[in-house]
Image (spheres, rainbow, N blue to C red):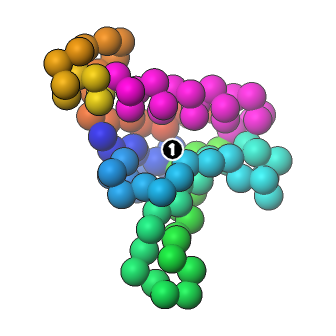
Amino acid sequence: MIIVSQDRRTIVNFDNMKTIELDSETNFTSINIFRETNEVETGVCGLFIGHYATEERAKEILQEIAQRYTNWENLKVGQPSGICSPRYVMPED
C-alpha cells in the first residue's frame, strides 16, 4: 500500500515505514511518517505527510490509515472487507 501526502508532493510505500505518528511539537495535529534509512547517525528519517486542525481529527486519519491497511492486507490473503485500495491519499482538513 502507498500513502500520498496531503500536499500531493510525496508518495510513501507502507512497507518501508517504521512508524506513523502524531507530532508532539504541533500539539499532535501533524502526522509524520518515520522510515528507516541507511544513515548511521540517526537510523530513521521523519517525513511530514499531513496537518489537521485538531488532535482528534489527526487521530481519525491515523485510524483510517490503519483500517485501509488492514483491508488491503486481508484482500491479499483472499478475505476482502471494506474499502480495499493499494493507495491512501491524505485528506484535506
The answer to whether any part of residue 9 appears in the image is no
Q: Is residue 46 left or right of residue 8?
A: right
Q: What residue sits right under mark 1 in the picture?
A: 6
The residue at 25%/14% (across/down) is: 80
- Give coordinates of residue 4: x percent, y percent: 40, 45
User: Image quadrant for the N terminus?
Assistant: top left
User: Image quadrant for the C terminus?
Assistant: top right
Q: Please, which residue is most extreme toward the bottom here?
A: 41
Residue 74 position (above or below residue 7): above
User: Number of callouts in the render?
Assistant: 1
The residue at 34%/17% (across/down) is: 83
Amino acid at dot 1: Gln
Quarter holding residue 87: top left
The residue at 48%/37% (across/down) is: 90
Q: Please, which residue is most extreme toward the top here?
A: 81
**Residue 56 painted magenta:** yes
The answer to whether any part of residue 30 appears in the image is yes
**Residue 1 painted magenta:** no
Q: Is residue 93 left or right of residue 13?
A: right
What range is drawn magenta here?
Answer: 52-71
- Give coordinates of residue 61: x percent, y percent: 58, 31
SS of the residue under disc 1: loop
